[in-house]
Image (spheres, rainbow, N blue to C red):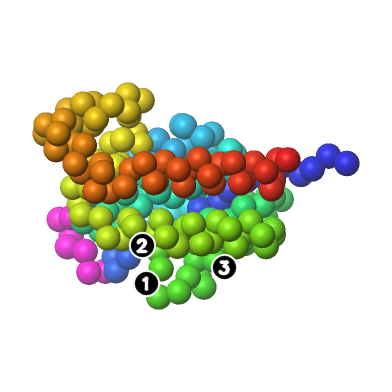
Amino acid sequence: MKKSKVYAVLTGDLVASSQIPANEYDALLYALDQTLRYLCRRDAGQYNVYRGDAFQLLLNKPQAWAHSAILLRLAMRSQLQDCRLSVGIGTISNPRPDVKSATGEAFTLSGTGLDSLPQGQRMNVQSTEDDFNWHMGITLRQTDALISQMTVRQAQALQEYLLLEDKSHLAVAKHLHTSRVNATKLLNQGHYDLLMQVILYSEQLTDRYFHG
């Protein structure tokens, strides 16, 4: 029996958006929009920003959910702000070009996950596979805490590292207008190697549970 296609849906909103100064809000929304556009190009997705401070991203490549979630968090942390994110992995009932009108399991899991996100926690993941949820849940809680503790400059370095095709520290340094030594320091302080392992682990686990 052929398995139904699985998608990843990321539902999120900006933290304390009403307290963001007006002169910073437009820049923050621009950074959010640019990041969502990049992720859609990279992983064959669609997105929608609604209510001013909320957004939803549908990924046709569900294995990319952790990379997308981490990059969105880094983009917001780079702006001295943050967002909450809930990932739902599952089927969708009516794939459409307009994500606003799509429904299904992945959307429901993502939406309810965001509504039930504990105070102070910024990321979670939900699926119909309890073992997957348990394993990835622990990993994501640790990743969440790590990103929440980053400085703006560390988040900027890690954001560039994920965006650039050239992963050399020199390339990151050029984009940050700093020295290679300082770029390396920022990447190490942000534990970039650990974040890359989390992304790889999430890709492998998602593939095992939903495409095996």
The residue tagged with tag 1: helix, strand or loop? Answer: loop
Q: Main secondary structure of the magenta part?
A: helix
Quadrant for the N terminus in the image: top right
The residue tagged with tag 3: helix, strand or loop? Answer: helix
Question: Is residue 177 rendered to the left or right of residue 56?
Answer: left
- Label 1: few (<14), some (14–19) or many (≥20) C-alpha neighbours in 10 Å: few
Q: Alpha-carbon distance for marks 2 and 3?
A: 21 Å
Q: Alpha-carbon distance for marks 1 and 3?
A: 17 Å
Q: Which residue is mark 3?
A: 112
> Outermost residue toward the top?
166
Q: Which mark is residue 120?
A: 1
Question: Which residue type does callout 1 highlight?
Answer: Gly
Coordinates of residue 204 in the picture (x, y in percent): 59, 41
Up the image or down, 149 lies above or below 206; here it is below
For the record, the magenta segment spans: 18-24
Question: Which residue type does callout 3 highlight?
Answer: Thr
* Residue 107 visible: no
Q: Is residue 186 magenta?
A: no
> Outermost residue toward the right?
1
Q: Which residue is mark 2?
A: 145
State the image quarter where residue 165 is shown: top left
